[in-house]
Amino acid sequence: MGLTIAQKIIKAHLVSGEMIAGTEIALKIDQTLTQDATGTMAYLEFETMGVDRVRTEKSVAYIDHNTLQSGFENADDHRYIQSVCRKHGIYFSRPGNGICHQVHLERFGKPGKTLIGSDSHTPTGGGIGMLAMGAGGLDVAVAMGGGAYHITCPKMYKVNLTGTLRPYVTAKDISLEILRILSVKGGVGAIIEWGGEGIKNLSVPQRATITNMGTELGATTSIFPSDEVTRAFLEAEGRGEDYTPLASDPDALYDKIIDIDLNTLEPLIACPHSPDNVVTVASLKGTKVDQVCIGSCTNSSLTDLMTVAALLKGKTIDPSVSLSISPGSKQVLTMLSECGALTDILASGARVLECACGPCIGMGFSPNSAGVSLRTFNRNFEGRSGTADAKVYLVSPETAVAAALTGYITDPTTLPYEYPNITMPQAFRIDDSAVLAPADPDEAKELEVLRGPNIKPFPDAFPQEDTLSAPLILKVGDNITTDHIMPAGSKILPYRSNIPHLSQYCFGVCDKTFPERAKAAGKGIIVGGSNYGQGSSREHAALVPLYLGIRCVIAKSFARIHIANLINAGIMPLTFADPADYDTLEQDHELELSDIYAGMDSGNIVMKNKTTGKEITLCCDFTDRQKAILKAGSLLKYTALN
Ligand code: MIC
Ligand code: SF4
């Protein structure tokens, strides 16, 4: 039987397990990346493992999230990460050099290799045929130490593209279309391979927009073949030698096949507050817009921003709209500047921000009260922009410009301007001076790691006991994101290495009393709906509840990275045997789970609701390794024991 692209890479990296969907496999990891908001914790975890030098082919630390530096915290964390990198063999991409996924694609990604990153949008690397996956910081730390990455072997989905995109219809619209078809849960447990003759006309930056946003489907990752388009990109980056061709076998089997006809695709828009809440731009025509933000790891490539500049050239934005543009990397910004496109952008009235995540993670540029903000980003979760009642819509750069120019949601295909068909350059401008190499091993031994006062110890691990008696502290609904559990934004993000401080904001979007109530109870259980923990890879969404005493989360279903983070932190994730039992549970019910060890082996744990007297069967599907992690109390403890 033939293999899919992902299966070929999995086969070449399989350390243990068999390539059977739904079973646990362990993969050798070639490359890792971290960003600063998750990186500080990941490097603290790496340090406790006592490994001198990373054992990957390449590990890179990026500073791109926490760049506001409104106090000493960010700068201290950057200095900590820089010093850890120099000592332990990790490349360090300085603040200002760009967003991790954009820079990694430009300078380091390689077809056929495995990459894990402590950021959920690591699948961006699938745009050049890498098997690139988001992971919790601890999993990345283990991979840096040479350990394998454990995942559930995914199912294989294929999306076939036919036809060609019409002017003003873009790769972002393809991403929104697949979200419309599959929803934010539709990719859970699957890898999505993109193919069909329609991909021939998609450049690597366009492909990377699609694999980046595949994260919002809940997919393990998304991947394109490595073909002549990939070769052209790598050659333009001066890395032709990194090219290897990669394609699926003609008789490869897929669990699902979806066809999308590019000829008939229209500009699309995701409405508040979910990336799969997709309608046509035309259907919202005339909605007043207050703010437009262009950038993020989804849409900040040179081709995206050259298109934006060409559309803005010689025009000024509507006076009622505030427009920000954040280039994805120093390479993008430098090239925009050298060809004069930056001048066109500035002349239009746009505000040019740093090459960083910026508004995407609520680091500045929050909308006005109840403001309508059109963003080229990948997430529009409630409150993420920093303005609680803002209405954030996700769009392509073309639709963003149309709104900035007119002040209203406007279908860009109706603009009276010829479409600027910008193609990728033959050669990018290469300057790696903002990537600092690590010290050589002899010098490294003498180097000191520099720690600031914002770095606080991790919460204690709690080995799973055979009985758990605890109250239900919080009950939430479907599709709870890690932005609900552990919000980010400019006030909170600087404290990613300070769990006690972060804990005051836990679940603030859902219930501001949660931290106080959880702490007072000392031990607690959370109940959630389906797809609990979707979104970010932040392990803080497990570590902070752990600090507040949460020992178990019971949900209808979980998102992939978050369930791994819960287990790594020693919090037991369980599902309902009968989802209707969710309705019988209420906040403050006293719950008791007994014979947990036997239940972990049989797959069923019985929970008694001591308040109502009802018995509820809960399910788990833990591997032996996961059981051992929970019994040890955390992956760190388990790693220390083995
Ligand atoms: C995000 O887009 O939500 C983030 C911020 O990049 C996160 C990482 C984090 O929370 O630090 C992600 O996607 O994993
Ligand atoms: Fe940064 Fe936004 Fe991309 Fe996350 S989604 S890595 S915050 S740009």
Image (cartoon, rainbow, N blue to C red):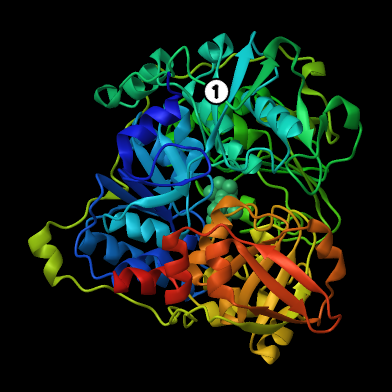
Q: Position of residue 157 (x, y in %)?
A: 58, 28
Q: Is residue 231 left or right of residue 268?
A: left
- Closer-to-camera residue (222/410): 222
- Examine the rendered structure and indicate whether residue 204 appears above or below residue 114: above
Measured as percent of width and height from the top left, residue 451 is found at 34, 77
Residue 299's place in the image compared with 140, above or below, is above
Of 272 and 292, the residue lying toward us: 272
Q: Is 307 situated above or below 448?
A: above
**Percent position (x, y) of residue 7?**
42, 30
Residue farthest to the left, as pictured: 442
Q: Quadrant of the C terminus?
A: bottom left
In the image, 123: left or right of 148? Answer: right
Judge left or right: residue 182 versus residue 447: right
Q: Is residue 92 visible?
A: yes
Mark 1 CB near ligand 2 (8 Å cut): no
Q: Which quarter of the rendered image does ligand 1 occupy? A: bottom right
Q: Quadrant of residue 374?
A: top right
Q: Position of residue 489 (x, y in %)?
A: 63, 63
Residue under the image location 78 percent in, 58 percent down: 578
Query: In what quadrant of the picture does the N terminus appear?
Result: top left
SS of the residue under disc 1: strand
Q: Is residue 539 visible?
A: no
**For the residue marked with disc 1, what is the amino acid?**
Trp
Residue depicted at x 33% and y 68%: 639
Q: Which residue is mark 1?
A: 194
